Image: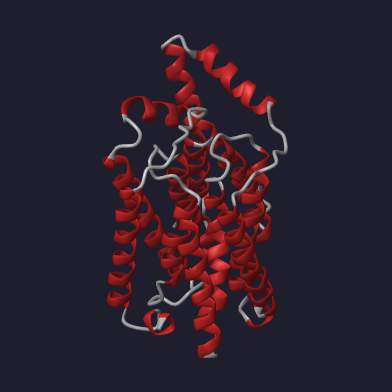
Amino acid sequence: MFTKIFKSDYIFQLIFILIVSIVLLVYKLSIETPATEYLQSPLSYFLNSVISSGSVFIIILNYTLLVLQALIFKRVLSSNDLTAKTNLLSSFLYIIFVPCFVNFHIIQPILICNLILIVVLQIIIPIYSKAESYENVFNTGALLAIASLTYIPSTLFLIFIFLAFLVYSLFKWREWLICIIGFITPYILYFGLVFLTDDLQSEINKYSAFFNSIHLKVIIFDTKQLVFIIAIGLLFIISLFYTFNKLSEKSIYYRKKTNVIFMFFLCSLSTFIFPSDIIISHIAIVLIPVIFFLNTYISQIKNLYISESLYLIIISVVIYNLL
Protein backbone atom coordinates (compact mmCIF):
# COMPACT_ATOMS: atom_id res chain seq x y z
CA MET A 1 0.00 0.00 0.00
CA PHE A 2 2.64 2.55 1.08
CA THR A 3 4.88 1.61 -1.82
CA LYS A 4 2.07 2.48 -4.22
CA ILE A 5 1.34 5.72 -2.40
CA PHE A 6 4.90 7.02 -2.78
CA LYS A 7 5.04 5.99 -6.42
CA SER A 8 1.72 7.62 -7.23
CA ASP A 9 0.83 11.13 -8.37
CA TYR A 10 2.65 13.98 -6.59
CA ILE A 11 -0.61 15.72 -5.57
CA PHE A 12 -2.01 12.51 -4.09
CA GLN A 13 1.17 12.07 -2.01
CA LEU A 14 0.94 15.66 -0.83
CA ILE A 15 -2.71 15.27 0.21
CA PHE A 16 -1.85 12.04 2.05
CA ILE A 17 0.99 13.73 3.95
CA LEU A 18 -1.19 16.71 4.88
CA ILE A 19 -3.87 14.35 6.21
CA VAL A 20 -1.27 12.51 8.30
CA SER A 21 0.07 15.80 9.69
CA ILE A 22 -3.48 16.96 10.58
CA VAL A 23 -4.16 13.66 12.37
CA LEU A 24 -0.94 14.07 14.36
CA LEU A 25 -1.84 17.68 15.14
CA VAL A 26 -5.30 16.72 16.44
CA TYR A 27 -3.72 13.99 18.55
CA LYS A 28 -1.19 16.39 20.06
CA LEU A 29 -3.95 18.90 20.79
CA SER A 30 -5.88 16.21 22.66
CA ILE A 31 -3.09 15.36 25.12
CA GLU A 32 -1.19 17.30 27.73
CA THR A 33 2.56 16.88 27.90
CA PRO A 34 4.84 18.19 30.68
CA ALA A 35 6.87 20.97 29.11
CA THR A 36 10.36 22.23 29.92
CA GLU A 37 11.07 25.63 28.40
CA TYR A 38 14.47 26.18 26.82
CA LEU A 39 15.78 29.55 27.99
CA GLN A 40 19.54 29.23 27.48
CA SER A 41 19.71 30.92 24.06
CA PRO A 42 18.84 34.61 23.53
CA LEU A 43 16.13 34.19 20.89
CA SER A 44 14.52 31.27 22.75
CA TYR A 45 14.44 33.34 25.93
CA PHE A 46 12.87 36.24 24.04
CA LEU A 47 10.20 34.09 22.38
CA ASN A 48 9.28 32.45 25.68
CA SER A 49 8.92 35.86 27.28
CA VAL A 50 6.40 37.12 24.70
CA ILE A 51 4.48 33.90 23.89
CA SER A 52 2.99 31.67 26.55
CA SER A 53 3.75 27.96 26.23
CA GLY A 54 1.08 25.29 26.18
CA SER A 55 -1.41 27.26 24.11
CA VAL A 56 -3.21 25.90 21.04
CA PHE A 57 -1.44 28.58 19.01
CA ILE A 58 1.99 27.19 19.94
CA ILE A 59 1.05 23.63 18.95
CA ILE A 60 -0.37 24.77 15.60
CA LEU A 61 2.66 26.99 14.98
CA ASN A 62 5.05 24.12 15.71
CA TYR A 63 3.17 21.79 13.37
CA THR A 64 3.16 24.43 10.65
CA LEU A 65 6.94 24.66 11.04
CA LEU A 66 7.15 20.85 10.92
CA VAL A 67 5.24 20.55 7.63
CA LEU A 68 7.15 23.50 6.13
CA GLN A 69 10.49 21.88 7.00
CA ALA A 70 9.39 18.53 5.60
CA LEU A 71 8.50 20.08 2.25
CA ILE A 72 11.66 22.22 2.10
CA PHE A 73 13.78 19.19 2.97
CA LYS A 74 12.22 17.26 0.11
CA ARG A 75 12.97 20.24 -2.13
CA VAL A 76 16.62 20.21 -0.99
CA LEU A 77 16.97 16.55 -1.97
CA SER A 78 15.09 16.72 -5.28
CA SER A 79 16.66 19.97 -6.49
CA ASN A 80 20.10 18.42 -5.95
CA ASP A 81 19.15 15.15 -7.68
CA LEU A 82 19.36 13.17 -4.45
CA THR A 83 15.80 11.86 -4.77
CA ALA A 84 13.08 11.73 -7.40
CA LYS A 85 11.24 15.02 -7.86
CA THR A 86 7.86 13.28 -7.50
CA ASN A 87 8.77 11.32 -4.35
CA LEU A 88 7.57 12.74 -1.01
CA LEU A 89 8.79 9.87 1.16
CA SER A 90 11.39 12.05 2.89
CA SER A 91 8.67 14.56 3.85
CA PHE A 92 6.46 11.78 5.19
CA LEU A 93 9.27 10.31 7.32
CA TYR A 94 10.17 13.74 8.67
CA ILE A 95 6.57 14.49 9.69
CA ILE A 96 6.07 11.19 11.53
CA PHE A 97 9.57 10.89 13.06
CA VAL A 98 10.08 14.33 14.61
CA PRO A 99 6.94 14.28 16.85
CA CYS A 100 8.32 11.15 18.52
CA PHE A 101 10.96 13.29 20.25
CA VAL A 102 9.83 16.91 20.07
CA ASN A 103 7.44 18.49 22.56
CA PHE A 104 5.00 20.66 20.61
CA HIS A 105 3.53 22.37 23.68
CA ILE A 106 6.45 24.79 24.10
CA ILE A 107 8.34 27.33 22.02
CA GLN A 108 10.46 24.71 20.30
CA PRO A 109 13.95 25.98 19.38
CA ILE A 110 14.76 22.63 17.75
CA LEU A 111 12.16 23.25 15.05
CA ILE A 112 13.48 26.75 14.36
CA CYS A 113 17.04 25.39 14.35
CA ASN A 114 16.11 22.53 11.99
CA LEU A 115 14.44 24.94 9.58
CA ILE A 116 17.63 27.00 9.39
CA LEU A 117 19.86 23.91 9.08
CA ILE A 118 17.75 22.59 6.19
CA VAL A 119 18.09 25.95 4.43
CA VAL A 120 21.86 25.81 5.06
CA LEU A 121 21.89 22.39 3.36
CA GLN A 122 20.07 23.87 0.39
CA ILE A 123 22.78 26.52 0.08
CA ILE A 124 25.87 24.40 0.77
CA ILE A 125 25.11 21.22 -1.23
CA PRO A 126 25.15 22.83 -4.72
CA ILE A 127 28.06 25.14 -3.90
CA TYR A 128 30.47 22.71 -5.57
CA SER A 129 29.16 23.62 -9.03
CA LYS A 130 29.35 27.39 -8.54
CA ALA A 131 32.36 29.38 -9.69
CA GLU A 132 31.81 32.27 -7.29
CA SER A 133 30.21 31.28 -4.01
CA TYR A 134 31.23 34.05 -1.64
CA GLU A 135 27.67 35.30 -1.05
CA ASN A 136 26.39 31.79 -0.36
CA VAL A 137 29.27 31.06 1.99
CA PHE A 138 28.60 34.29 3.91
CA ASN A 139 24.88 33.40 4.12
CA THR A 140 25.57 29.94 5.54
CA GLY A 141 27.75 31.43 8.27
CA ALA A 142 25.15 34.08 9.13
CA LEU A 143 22.31 31.54 9.18
CA LEU A 144 24.25 29.24 11.50
CA ALA A 145 24.83 32.16 13.87
CA ILE A 146 21.09 32.86 13.94
CA ALA A 147 20.45 29.15 14.58
CA SER A 148 22.90 29.21 17.49
CA LEU A 149 21.19 32.30 18.93
CA THR A 150 18.05 30.14 18.97
CA TYR A 151 19.67 26.89 20.10
CA ILE A 152 23.31 27.15 21.20
CA PRO A 153 24.43 23.56 20.35
CA SER A 154 23.94 24.34 16.64
CA THR A 155 27.15 26.41 16.91
CA LEU A 156 29.13 23.25 16.10
CA PHE A 157 27.60 23.11 12.63
CA LEU A 158 30.15 25.72 11.64
CA ILE A 159 32.51 22.72 11.59
CA PHE A 160 30.08 21.04 9.16
CA ILE A 161 30.56 23.92 6.69
CA PHE A 162 34.34 23.48 6.86
CA LEU A 163 34.00 19.72 6.40
CA ALA A 164 31.83 20.39 3.34
CA PHE A 165 34.59 22.64 1.98
CA LEU A 166 37.06 19.76 2.41
CA VAL A 167 34.72 17.32 0.63
CA TYR A 168 34.36 19.78 -2.24
CA SER A 169 38.10 20.57 -2.23
CA LEU A 170 37.50 24.26 -1.56
CA PHE A 171 40.85 25.16 -0.08
CA LYS A 172 40.89 28.89 -0.88
CA TRP A 173 41.23 30.91 2.29
CA ARG A 174 38.57 33.40 1.14
CA GLU A 175 35.66 30.94 1.51
CA TRP A 176 36.77 29.95 4.99
CA LEU A 177 37.29 33.55 6.13
CA ILE A 178 34.01 34.79 4.59
CA CYS A 179 32.12 32.00 6.35
CA ILE A 180 33.63 33.02 9.70
CA ILE A 181 32.81 36.68 9.02
CA GLY A 182 29.23 35.66 8.17
CA PHE A 183 29.00 33.75 11.46
CA ILE A 184 30.43 36.61 13.51
CA THR A 185 28.23 39.34 11.98
CA PRO A 186 24.90 38.44 13.73
CA TYR A 187 26.78 38.14 17.03
CA ILE A 188 28.31 41.59 16.58
CA LEU A 189 24.82 42.99 15.99
CA TYR A 190 23.38 41.08 18.95
CA PHE A 191 26.11 41.99 21.45
CA GLY A 192 25.99 45.58 20.17
CA LEU A 193 22.29 45.62 21.01
CA VAL A 194 22.75 44.19 24.52
CA PHE A 195 25.61 46.66 25.08
CA LEU A 196 23.23 49.52 24.36
CA THR A 197 20.79 48.06 26.90
CA ASP A 198 23.53 47.56 29.54
CA ASP A 199 23.13 43.76 29.48
CA LEU A 200 26.45 42.93 27.80
CA GLN A 201 28.25 41.52 30.85
CA SER A 202 25.22 39.46 31.79
CA GLU A 203 25.06 37.85 28.33
CA ILE A 204 28.81 37.20 28.30
CA ASN A 205 28.50 35.46 31.68
CA LYS A 206 25.64 33.28 30.36
CA TYR A 207 27.65 32.14 27.36
CA SER A 208 30.75 31.59 29.47
CA ALA A 209 28.82 29.46 31.95
CA PHE A 210 27.26 27.46 29.13
CA PHE A 211 30.51 26.60 27.35
CA ASN A 212 32.28 25.86 30.62
CA SER A 213 29.62 23.25 31.39
CA ILE A 214 30.24 21.20 28.23
CA HIS A 215 30.43 17.50 29.07
CA LEU A 216 29.23 14.13 27.88
CA LYS A 217 25.84 13.49 29.42
CA VAL A 218 24.10 10.14 29.76
CA ILE A 219 20.74 10.44 28.02
CA ILE A 220 17.90 8.50 29.62
CA PHE A 221 15.28 7.28 27.16
CA ASP A 222 11.97 5.70 28.01
CA THR A 223 11.02 2.29 26.60
CA LYS A 224 9.12 3.69 23.62
CA GLN A 225 11.99 5.94 22.59
CA LEU A 226 14.47 3.07 22.93
CA VAL A 227 12.33 0.89 20.66
CA PHE A 228 12.27 3.70 18.08
CA ILE A 229 16.02 4.30 18.28
CA ILE A 230 16.89 0.61 18.00
CA ALA A 231 14.48 -0.13 15.13
CA ILE A 232 15.15 3.00 13.08
CA GLY A 233 18.84 2.84 13.99
CA LEU A 234 19.15 -0.64 12.50
CA LEU A 235 17.33 0.47 9.35
CA PHE A 236 19.62 3.49 9.16
CA ILE A 237 22.76 1.32 9.38
CA ILE A 238 21.41 -0.90 6.59
CA SER A 239 20.57 2.18 4.52
CA LEU A 240 23.99 3.67 5.16
CA PHE A 241 25.83 0.57 3.98
CA TYR A 242 23.52 0.25 0.97
CA THR A 243 24.00 3.89 -0.07
CA PHE A 244 27.80 3.86 0.21
CA ASN A 245 28.00 0.47 -1.47
CA LYS A 246 26.19 1.92 -4.49
CA LEU A 247 28.18 5.18 -4.58
CA SER A 248 30.73 3.81 -7.05
CA GLU A 249 27.92 3.58 -9.61
CA LYS A 250 27.05 7.26 -9.19
CA SER A 251 28.61 10.44 -10.54
CA ILE A 252 31.40 12.20 -8.67
CA TYR A 253 29.05 15.08 -7.86
CA TYR A 254 26.44 12.70 -6.37
CA ARG A 255 29.14 11.04 -4.26
CA LYS A 256 30.36 14.37 -2.95
CA LYS A 257 26.84 15.51 -2.06
CA THR A 258 26.17 12.25 -0.23
CA ASN A 259 29.43 12.65 1.70
CA VAL A 260 28.42 16.18 2.68
CA ILE A 261 25.18 14.88 4.18
CA PHE A 262 27.17 12.21 6.03
CA MET A 263 29.36 15.02 7.45
CA PHE A 264 26.12 16.65 8.60
CA PHE A 265 25.25 13.41 10.40
CA LEU A 266 28.61 13.32 12.19
CA CYS A 267 28.26 16.96 13.28
CA SER A 268 24.72 16.36 14.52
CA LEU A 269 26.04 13.59 16.76
CA SER A 270 28.92 15.72 18.04
CA THR A 271 26.54 18.42 19.32
CA PHE A 272 25.35 16.05 22.07
CA ILE A 273 28.37 17.16 24.11
CA PHE A 274 26.43 20.35 24.82
CA PRO A 275 24.26 20.23 27.96
CA SER A 276 20.63 20.99 27.18
CA ASP A 277 17.32 20.99 28.99
CA ILE A 278 15.72 19.51 25.87
CA ILE A 279 18.39 16.97 24.97
CA ILE A 280 15.79 14.37 23.91
CA SER A 281 14.34 16.78 21.34
CA HIS A 282 17.87 17.29 20.06
CA ILE A 283 17.52 13.92 18.28
CA ALA A 284 15.32 15.70 15.73
CA ILE A 285 18.50 17.28 14.31
CA VAL A 286 20.07 13.84 13.80
CA LEU A 287 16.91 12.72 11.99
CA ILE A 288 17.63 15.04 9.03
CA PRO A 289 20.53 12.98 7.60
CA VAL A 290 19.01 9.71 8.87
CA ILE A 291 15.89 10.33 6.79
CA PHE A 292 17.97 11.05 3.70
CA PHE A 293 19.67 7.65 3.88
CA LEU A 294 16.42 5.85 4.70
CA ASN A 295 14.72 7.58 1.78
CA THR A 296 17.56 6.59 -0.56
CA TYR A 297 17.41 2.94 0.50
CA ILE A 298 13.64 2.44 0.64
CA SER A 299 13.00 4.27 -2.65
CA GLN A 300 15.29 1.89 -4.54
CA ILE A 301 13.92 -1.39 -3.19
CA LYS A 302 12.39 -3.38 -6.05
CA ASN A 303 10.83 -6.18 -4.00
CA LEU A 304 7.31 -5.15 -2.98
CA TYR A 305 7.22 -7.45 0.07
CA ILE A 306 10.48 -6.07 1.48
CA SER A 307 9.46 -2.43 0.98
CA GLU A 308 6.01 -2.99 2.51
CA SER A 309 7.59 -4.79 5.46
CA LEU A 310 9.89 -1.84 6.07
CA TYR A 311 6.97 0.59 5.91
CA LEU A 312 5.07 -1.60 8.37
CA ILE A 313 8.01 -1.61 10.80
CA ILE A 314 8.37 2.17 10.56
CA ILE A 315 4.66 2.91 11.00
CA SER A 316 4.35 0.43 13.89
CA VAL A 317 7.33 1.93 15.73
CA VAL A 318 5.99 5.48 15.30
CA ILE A 319 2.47 4.58 16.46
CA TYR A 320 3.87 2.72 19.48
CA ASN A 321 6.02 5.73 20.35
CA LEU A 322 3.23 8.28 20.03
CA LEU A 323 0.47 6.39 21.84
Query: Residue at the location (56% across, 70% down)?
Result: 294
Vertical side of 270 occupied by 248: above or below: below
Colour scheme in the image?
A: secondary structure
Question: How many callouts does the rendering have?
Answer: 0
The N terminus: image quadrant: bottom left
Where in the figure is residue 163, as x and y percent of width and height? 67, 53
Vertical side of 10 occupied by 317: above or below: above
Query: Residue at the location (64% across, 36% down)?
Result: 274
The C terminus: image quadrant: bottom left
Q: Nearer the viewer, residue 46 or 28?
A: 28
Query: Residue at the location (51% across, 43% down)?
Result: 138
Vertical side of 230 occupied by 185: above or below: above
Where in the figure is residue 82, as x and y percent of width and height? 51, 72
Q: Residue furthest top?
A: 198
Query: Residue at the location (31% across, 48% down)?
Result: 29
Q: Nearer the viewer, residue 110 or 169?
A: 110
Vertical side of 90 occupied by 148: above or below: above
Using the rendered image of the protein, determine whether residue 130 is visible from the camera's viewpoint: no
Q: Nearer the viewer, residue 141 or 267?
A: 267
User: Seen in the image, is 215 located left or right of residue 44?
Assistant: right
Where in the figure is residue 52, as x and y percent of width and height? 32, 30
Where in the figure is residue 242, as x and y percent of width and height? 66, 77
Q: Nearer the viewer, residue 323 or 216?
A: 323
Using the rendered image of the protein, determine whether residue 32 is visible from the camera's viewpoint: yes
